[in-house]
Amino acid sequence: MDERIIVAGGGIGGLAAALAISRAGFPVLVLEKAAELGEIGAGIQLGPNAFRAFEALGVSAGARKTAVYVDRLVMMDAATAEEVCHVDVGEAFRARFGNPYAVVHRGELHRVLLRACEADPRITLRTNAAIAGYETAGGGATAVLASGERLEAAALIGADGLWSMVRAQLVGDGKPRVSGHTTYRSVIPTEQMPADIRWNAAALWCGPKVHLVHYPLSDGKTFNLVVTAHNDATQPAAGVPVPHGEVLRLFAHVHPRAQQLIHAGRDWKYWVLCDREPVTRWTDGPVALLGDAAHPTLQYLAQGACMAMEDAVTLGECLSDHPRDIPAALVAYQDARVLRTARVVLQSRAIGEHVYHPVGAHAALRNQIMGAKSQAEWLDVFDWLYGSGWQPRAQERRAA
């Protein structure tokens, strides 16, 4: 049996998995269906848990250099343009969680991980290699490619995203769940960002059935604009160009100050947001799921990439614990991750419905409850996600 482990998918989760598996002592083959390794999309947010993952994966220096460190998380009422609340992510936040809060361009973070994989002699990267399914026999796994080629390995990790072919066979739960929410994205030069909201913050404007997000990227040279409407979309879509006027129409009811974001945006593209019901089984002998293939989530906790990197680190730890019994390692990994990621999926849905998009009295109650919290109380709210809920093994030992 081949000792290598195959990772299906060369996105952030797949590359993080490759690094973690290599650090556990296994050779790795990454299979990416696209012709080039890269990432689509724009900005992502990085909680303190992401920085713990960077350290465990050996990419801390590069990731920290690429990130933009914001001062605050700000929530605005998009109907009135009044601040609802903010969380200072400075000294007290860093002291509580051991790391900062930041934002980063998805492509720039992917390049950090890609360079680390390219520099690792145990990792082989292969493009134009779409996986169609797998077989298990003799204690190992065989990746079956769309071309018909068969590649044997000690294990297969399906990090092939929302439409994972590995999940289709392992779980068999059909198409993703369409949320009915559509996100529109644009990246603009900083000088085009309206001066009165050109904040060094991850800013969220919550309005009736819509919300708007903005933050700086690329060393402050650009701004990421992400606006979302609960428009009852029924079909998945990803990266589709859309006329500026259509985006403006969906946000015509928000305050003119918030509408500035729509006017400033250029070359809008839209994604219809999807997730899946959480499942408790991610493994099939020497096969396991990771990242969006295991637990695709809506964007409302800003944790999709963070959860994938946490998965990768935990997977590497479990392989180190059970190097001669990979199925046992994968079950241990699954058991360590299922409930935490299910909470992210389910709480993201709830936040989208009850925090981001309420109307009328519901929105007023949200503002009252969230506006009454002290900075110390906000740190307690976030502890399960950024603090005590997950620590890489080596960092647990250091903390002890």
Image: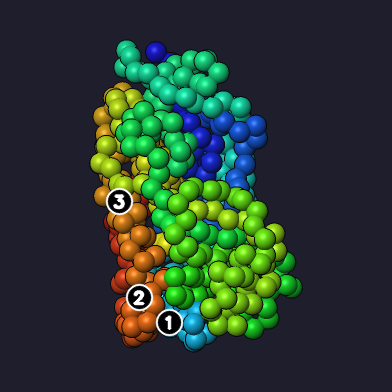
Q: Position of residue 188 (x, y in %)?
A: 69, 65
Residue at image point 42% right, 62% down: 300
The mark nearer the N terminus, 1 or 3, is: 1
* Observer-nearest of 49 and 373: 373
In contact (CB < 8 Å): disc 2 and disc 1: yes
Quadrant where the N terminus sits is top left
Whether residue 187 appears in this view of the structure is no
Q: Position of residue 273 (x, y in %)?
A: 47, 54
The mark nearer the N terminus, 2 or 3, is: 3
Mark whose residue sits in front, 2 or 3:
3
Q: Secondary structure at mark 3?
A: helix
Task: Check disc 3 and report the residue beneath it.
Answer: 342
Quadrant where the C terminus sits is bottom left
Q: Position of residue 123 (x, y in %)?
A: 54, 29
Whether residue 325 appears in this view of the structure is yes
Q: Secondary structure at mark 2?
A: helix
Residue at image point 31% right, 17% down: 139
